Amino acid sequence: MTKYIFVTGGVTSSLGKGIIAASLAKLLQERNYKVTIQKLDPYINIDPGTLNPYEHGECYVTDDGAETDLDLGHYERFLNTPTSQDNNVTTGRIYQTVINKEREGAYLGKTVQVIPHITDEIKRRVVLLAEKYDYDIIIKEIGGTVGDIESLPYLEAIRQLKRELGDNNCICVHLTLIPYLSAAKELKTKPTQHAVKELLQAGIQPDVLICRTEHTLSKELKQKLSLFCNVDYKSVIEAIDADTIYDVPLLMLKEKLDIRVLKKLKLKTSNTPELEAWKAFLWKLKNPSERVRIALIGKYNELPDAYKSIYESFTHSGAHNECKVDVVPIHSQVLENNDPEKYLQDFDGMLVAPGFGERGVEGKIEAIKYARENGIPFFGICLGMQCAVVEFARNVLKLKSAHSTEVKPKAKNPVIHLLPDQENITNMGGTMRLGSYKCKIEKSTIVHKAYSKTEISERHRHRYEFNNAYKKDLIKNGMIISGINPDNELVEIVELEDHPFFVGVQFHPELKSTVEKPHPLFVAFVKAALKYKLSNEKA
């Protein structure tokens, strides 16, 4: 029988439930249990696909085309296994299903209510993963904070499941905050006591209490938490602030979180996690022999979570190259009315980030022109690749009116355009080219050297495409089309001749980079940036 672990949060949001869930899953995976994680999000959007990155951070896309919460990125990066549509459930999706069933007459004239209809649908989604796949343990992260109105149906569903499945098959891990008052010079437990009381009012007794803290928890403080929160002493776990999120699995191993959970689930605790590959990665991460500076040219730089997977991909690829990557965000709008050299001359490489809309596009094009003309390693992702094509068409082919129809619908030279099958779409949610698509790579190219193979599969999230009407002219003038979708002949990758590293990709490689398998294009880009830096130092 599949076992379930529910991870809830108290006191405040942004405590790191996703990291704790992923760390616990990693430890259980190392003990040879088949584990996955599911995010239950209380917001009423069907998915985060139409949310502004400033509102929700990055929208993470799975192989099967689901637009999901960024926490699924953490799950994949830690577990090195893909997630799917089933790993992210929102209140919007729950209500949509129930309302559709009501319209179909599925409830036989009954009054549709939160209990039992909404809670039953939540429970159905919870066990769906176990029915579709053969998992030993499924961890369920509940979004938001205990006490939020939006979370109440989920807490009621957990209460029911704990009663139906039994304490040995369904447990609750509660993540909370132990704040430090500098004026009193002490840690305070009262917020946690109140958070647990909120959970108890919902009928749920936490089985494990994980305490986020800036300072080590004393034995006396743990005993106090154990007494007032009715959690056994060994199940009060310290989660002290770490230098990097990748330290957390080792910290949780030290605190024996996995042992406490397995004992409560009546599962074997043999085969102690070694985490050798993880430790090797951490050693390289913390002991780099070199350092490079990469400019991240984007439009959502005020919120780092908007580019979360890109930052993490640089962490993975930097460690692989034994190199510290200092990623410096530069707002693309700043480059529109200023000399790019003023902002970009001291970098070893630049990545032009994905995005939507007109704002900041001209600044991205100016940055790409500077990188192309000055031989600075360049990596463009999605819109970054499209801007590279526009820049090349304008300044090499001399098509001054070249543009994307996303920005200029009536462009005279639409080198990037909307495909016919996208033209009549009116619903914005879930209608882009989403998920994994194949790409055939040309031999003897930068990307072929990086991947070491001629056929790959990468994840997409976009509406606009390279216009094949301009392909011959672009190739004739020095642009290399190094990757093409074999099914529809759409251009996926472009490169330039006689340049240290100039690669633009239509897909999102950052979504497939993990601790154990850094993405080959990020690895190659960091390597090129390091080579560029060292050659400049010799000069």
Image: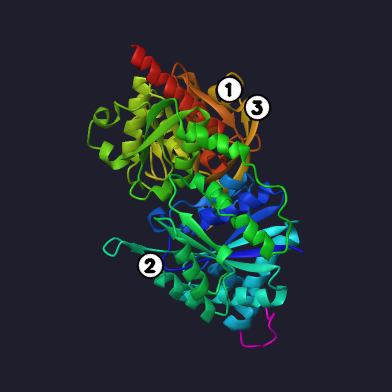
Q: Toward the viewer: 370 or 86?
A: 86
Residue plotted at (56% across, 50% down): 254
Residue pointed to by mark 3: 454
Horizontal side, residue 271 vs residue 203: left or right: right
Residue 64 percent location from the top left of the image = 63, 50
Q: Are marks 1 and 2 in contact (CB under 8 Å)?
A: no
Q: Marks 3 and 2: which is nearer the front?
A: 2
Q: Secondary structure at mark 1?
A: helix
Mark 2 residue type: Lys
Asked if the magenta segment contains residue 201, the reply would be: no
Q: Secondary structure at mark 2?
A: loop
- Residues under labels 3 and 2: Cα distance? 58 Å
Q: Secondary structure at mark 3?
A: loop
Q: To which residue does mark 2 refer?
A: 188
Chief SS of the magenta region: loop
Q: Amino acid at mark 3?
A: Thr
Provide the residue span drawn in magenta.
Answer: 104-112
Cα distance in 3D space between marks 1 and 3 = 10 Å
Q: Would you say 63 lies left or right of 178 here?
A: right
Where is residue 297 drawn, in percent x and y? 36, 38
Going from the N terminus, do you reach mark 1 or mark 2 first?
2
The first of marks 1 and 3 along the sequence is 1
Q: Nearer the viewer, mark 1 or mark 3?
A: 1
Residue sitting at x 33%, y 32%? 367
Residue located farthest toward the front when viewing the structure as drawn? 220
| Percent of width and height locating residue 253 | 58, 50
Residue sitting at x 50%, y 38%: 313
- Residue 428 visible to the viewer: no
**Residue at x 38% of width, y 43% of height:** 410
Residue identified by numbered label 1:
449
- Where is the C terminus found, in terms of image quarters? top left
